[in-house]
Image: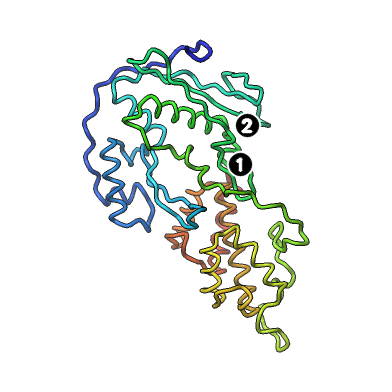
Amino acid sequence: MKPNGIPAIVPKSQPPALPASPISLQLLKEAVNIPDATDAELAFFGHVAARMNLDPLRKQIYMIKRWNPELQREVFSHQVGIDGFRSAAERTGKYCGQTAPQWCGPDGIWMDAWLDEAHPPAAARIGVYRSDFREPIVAVARFAEYCQRTKDGKPNRMWRTMPSNQLAKCAESLALRKAFPNELGGVYTPEEMAQGENSPMTPPAVSPQTNPKINGEIPEIVAESETVSATEPEVMSTEIVSTLLPFRETLGDAYYHRILREIGGAEHSNQIPLQKARHCWKIFRSCELIMEFQERIGIDTVREVLHRHGFQSAKEIPTLEEFRSILTELRGIEVSQ
């Protein structure tokens, strides 16, 4: 049964495309734009793209590096864009279009357009038609299951500003994969997989008295002069240790300890001299500000700015002066948008 009696959107029939030729390594490097991807990883990505007859240069398939909260490190994955899904379905010669997307709120009443700007839709659905199926394949995507969230549990910029569009893409991807499992089984769109970066649990709210970095303000004990006085203790007090520990959760265990080692010269926060502890705090906070800009203006924009400043990988640690320059440019971009 067609969802709500909406007619199918039927594309013009086209002959199946010939298998794609492998893309040169240099073109893959330009298309992927992940400097720390090895030649072997890029070559494997090119093999996957050719096997699926998808073009990375036309953004039909992506090689994406995402933070894995379980592994506590970034991992590569291959994800097919929604245009790649549509192209793969059309090449079968059995794709006969789809229904227009619909959305509903918690009441379960489906509607043709989502106009409530104050609240995201609870779910979206789309039906896909195949020439050899009697009924459309309908898929439903729920906002709670696919929404990508920031570290404080709120929807990220795309899911906050375009929730109905993001959810409709997830529903369409689900429907196309169900309708064409041989071509699309086991591959997913970035919109479907982004929620995999969500933290497994939202950290509890902390009052300003117990969280010394609330609202980005520098704690008084950290903001003191960089010059160490003769009476200043050589190793940090418990008070300063408490200013560093919250960063371990927001930045990840591996990056946190790397900064402690490279900037603080110690394996644990309670072993760092006071002057270096203040330096570590400022580096930690600068890293957090970069992450916040990723949510507000997009990870691709932030990555381009980092590249312009000579940083090819998120694993690198800029100096405070370099951080200031990067953050100044990011603020300028945000104001201009």
The numbered dot on residue 216 is none
Q: Amino acid at mark 2?
A: Pro
The residue sitting at the bottom extreme is: 230
53 to the left or right of 257 = left
> Where residue 37 sits: x, y (%)?
35, 56
With respect to residue 64, does 179 lie above or below?
Answer: above
With respect to residue 77, does 86 lie above or below?
Answer: above
> Where residue 66 sits: x, y (%)?
46, 50
The residue sitting at the right extreme is: 209
Secondary structure of the residue carrying numbered label 2: loop
Q: Residues within 10 Å of mark 1 (few under 14, many from 20)?
A: some
Q: Amino acid at mark 1?
A: Pro
With respect to residue 317, does 142 lie above or below?
Answer: above
Which residue is at 45% across, 29% downward?
174
Which residue is at 21% across, 39% downward?
21
Q: Residues within 10 Å of mark 2 (few under 14, many from 20)?
A: many
Residue bearing mark 1: 155
Q: Earlier in the sequence, mark 1 or mark 2?
A: 2
- Marks 1/2: CA–CA distance: 10 Å
Q: Quadrant of the C terminus?
A: top right
Camera-nearest residue between 192 and 275: 192
Which residue is at 38% across, 12% downward?
134
Residue bearing mark 2: 120
> Where residue 190 sits: x, y (%)?
45, 40
Which residue is at 41% across, 37% downward?
188
> Where residue 44 sits: x, y (%)?
28, 49
